Image (cartoon, rainbow, N blue to C red):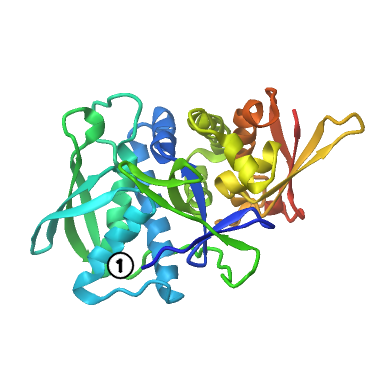
Amino acid sequence: MDIDLRYHKNKGIYVLNGLRVMLLPRGSLALIQDYVSTILGLATKSIFEEAMATTMYSFIQDLIKSKKLKLHGEKSSEELFDLISDLGLGHINSMSKDIGSYSFTIDRCFNSVLSTIKSVNSCFQAGGILVALYRLMLEKDVKVTEAKCKSTGNSDIDWFDVNVIGANGNYSYVSSPIYMMDDQNFEKIEILTAEFGILINSIPVEVIPVIFFPYLFSRLRKIIGMGVYGIQYGIGTALSKLYSPYPISNVSTKYHVDGFSTLSPLVGVGLVQTIKNDFGGLKEVDVYDSFNSLHIDTEVEKRCFLLSGIFTGLSYNLVGTNLKIKETDCAAVNNSMCKFSLD
């Protein structure tokens, strides 16, 4: 599949072959998992594997339904592996195949980008991607076991074993927001391939379906209740630190935006607009089409705590002073937009 990534300047979103996605700095998905694991421990594995399996299974199903992706029999695995690589998530290599049993390596795996060596294998989300791919190809459930993990320091690459369990046609599915690519406000985005993955706007990134965060946090909420919103906020502030090595100002200049509005082309969070008070100081930040407010469950409540954390964490970089930002209105409770104010 030819990757067609575009940015909509009036909506502040990225769309890949018609489906909305987000751009995160490389290492983000590993950081998020690591952050949650300090709170939930061993339960983190099943949550993140299932969240990524459902998200990627649903995303690729939508690409197939929209006829943007066509799988061709024996070449299906190559096409799907190429898609994962094109998203900056790693290059999957088939090492061996037996009846109902497969072995793979993932080079440049997004899930083993950690700042410290871990004593246990940790590529839970990468395992979820393999589950999703083999659900699509075999229409069967599989069990993924990570045999070697780069994060342990005992291997220079991540190894996985995939074993077929059996048929199961009742997989969770979450639809992605779909957009018509002929909208003239969409600008085609160049994706550069680098040794470690992909570059967009000169920043190493991971491209993920926009439904990933809402689905993950919905799953976490069922386990820990409203404490998930504190986790979201903490993750947001932690993610912002990953931008420190990169020239965010170049993105502002390229897209003719400044301050918090830079987050629109930087990440695709939605259209960010700021309102100032009579003295020229920041009064309010409004976000239209916030990724964080997408409904995955039936809970009706403010939910853009991850976005609040990102605003807070990047405030010094974007507006020159440290601020604490909190959400006051949310599209998830039928407000026209998500509003954020200074706490």
Is residue 321 in sight in this rendering? Answer: yes
Is residue 172 in sight in this rendering? Answer: no
Left or right of residue 191, residue 13 in this image: right
Estimate the x, y position of residue 170 in percent, counting from the top left.
36, 68
The front one of 134 and 64 is 64
From the image, tell me which residue sits under label 1: 136
Report crowding for label 1: few under 14, some 14 to 19, many 20 or more residues within 10 A (C-alpha). some
Query: Which residue is the extreme one toward the right?
Result: 278
In which quadrant of the rendered view does residue 59 lie?
bottom left
Left or right of residue 34, residue 21 in this image: right
Estimate the x, y position of residue 140 in percent, counting from the top left.
25, 66
Quarter of the picture containing the N terminus is: bottom left
**Residue positioned 23% across, 47% down in the render:** 106
Asked which secondary structure carries label 1, the reply is: helix
Question: Label 1 amino acid?
Answer: Leu
**Residue positioned 46% across, 75% down in the render:** 66
**Residue positioned 69% across, 57% down in the render:** 10
